[in-house]
Amino acid sequence: MRIDLHTHTLLSDGELLPMELARRAFVKGHSAIAFTDHVALSTLERVLKEARLDIELAESWGMQVLLGVEITHVPAAKMDHVIAEARRKGAEIVVVHGETISEPVEKGTNLAAVSNPEVDILAHPGFITEEEAELAKTNGVHLEITSRASHCKTNGHVAQIARKVGARMVVNTDAHSPSDLIDTPTAFMIAQGAGLGRKEAEEAVLVNPAALVKKRRG
């Protein structure tokens, strides 16, 4: 079943209540989803507190819903502090908004993220370097292959660099609306479209996300 560990609700710039996004994901065949709304220090506590309330309701359907954040446009030099605060306030999944080519993300963000083993996923990392991917492998940071149109243009590069060094990948949607959610066959197409073979796609779509959920939930 589908696992998506990068989604947004109206607690940041998404369209749906956390509760409604969870319901849409459940009906679409998801076994787990993470709410990872955009945060910096200004919104971190509020977003986690409010999302937690809907998670308690949504899990009554039998789907795992993880409390997470996407740390976004934080200065690279301050990244470790914000990551530590996110964990301290209860974030189960920590995503860092990577150096996508479609937004003016500060150079050094990718490096700061992959250097911190408390980061679960570096989202849409753009033209990530081999050295950064090596650090991601060492520190257990997963590199994202994304289905989001504004960020997916460098999927092929991310996949090539990740497979070269053996860094783990995950396929996420970065969903902002219900139409952004995808099923498992579509996730496989995204992975294979990035240049992954069938076994590599299985790891990115099924194995690695499930392992992350198990790591954070036990």
Image (cartoon, rainbow, N blue to C red):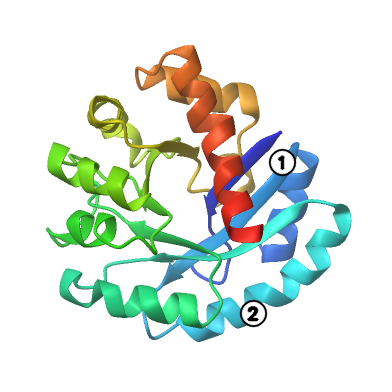
The vertical placement of 44 against 166, above or below, is below
Numbered tag placed on residue 30 in the rendering: 1
Rendering coords of residue 126 (x, y %)? 23, 42
Numbered circle sitting on residue 50: 2
Q: Residue at x 54, y 54 (%)?
A: 7
Q: Is residue 105 visible?
A: no
The disc placed on residue 1 is none
Q: CA distance from mark 2 to mark 1?
A: 22 Å
The amino acid type, in three-letter code, at marker 2 is Glu
N-terminal-most mark, 2 or 1:
1
Residue 101, x across and y down, in percent:
21, 45
Q: Is residue 60 above or below residue 161?
A: below
- Report the front residue among 103 and 130: 130
- Count of picture labels: 2
Residue beneath the point at 48% across and 48% down: 174
Using the image, determine if residue 159 lies above or below residue 60.
Answer: above
Q: Secondary structure at mark 1?
A: strand
**Residue 203, image x and y in percent?**
51, 28
Circle 2: element type? helix
Instruction: Decide if residue 86 is on the left or right side of residue 15.
Output: left
Q: Residues within 10 Å of mark 2 (few under 14, many from 20)?
A: few
The reply, left or right, for residue 203 in relation to residue 102 is right
Identify the image quadrant of residue 218.
bottom right
Quadrant of the rendering where the N terminus is positioned: top right
What's the amino acid at mark 1? His
